Image (spheres, rainbow, N blue to C red):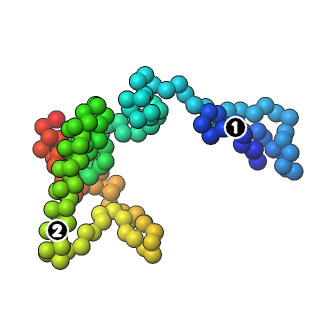
Amino acid sequence: GYKILGQWDTKLYAIPLDASGKEKNEESWVLWEKYEMPPEYEKYYFFTKFAMSLNELHDWQKPYLPLTDSRLRPDQRALEIGDVDLAANEKNRLEEEQRGRRKEMEFKNEAWQTKWFENRSGVWVYKGGYWSAREQKVFDVVDIFGIKDKLEKS
């Protein structure tokens, strides 16, 4: 086994243990170390370079994503480029459209159905279909962000 030491926000080490749980006379090694923050990180919510990269989106990826992928959110994209006013307007637009869809479904007495997951006694379980839809580039989902036309032009 191993003993893990360090601080959660700077560096973590692993130290090998023998069968009795005592530290072996071997060197520890670094499991994780905080990297230098990116330039102007204050403008980007104090995100690390890794955190910033989680929302990264390349043009080649777009055909493989459903229109519901959060990386396509226009309000989020506006925040990333620093346009707070546009982000607020887009977020409001998205929320109003969502309310409208919900009211329409209630009027029709319809319930929202998830596409790729189902709730089994409080646990969300993948029910299949996503990977084949991705392979075929056909997702058959609601354009909740109103971006389909923009994506087809890009």
The quadrant holding residue 111 is bottom left
Residue 78 on image: x %, y %: 25, 36
Residue 69 on image: x %, y %: 30, 49
Residue 124 visible somewhere in the drawing: yes
> What number is the disc on residue 103?
2
- Where disc 1 sits, the SS reads strand
Q: Which residue is nearer to you in this view: 58 or 5?
A: 5
Q: Earlier in the sequence, mark 2 or mark 1?
A: 1
Q: Which residue is nearer to you in this view: 32 or 24?
A: 32
Q: Count the marks.
A: 2
Q: How crowded is the residue under tag 1: few (<14 C-alpha within 10 Å), some, or many (20+)?
A: some
Residue for badge 1: 6
Q: Which residue is nearer to you in this view: 79 or 33?
A: 79
**Can you say whether 114 is above or below 66 in the image?**
below
Residue 39 on image: x %, y %: 43, 22
Three-letter amino acid code at the position of disc 1: Gly
Q: Quadrant of the C terminus?
A: top left
**Can you say whether 148 is above or below 129 in the image?**
above
Residue 46 relative to residue 58: left or right: right
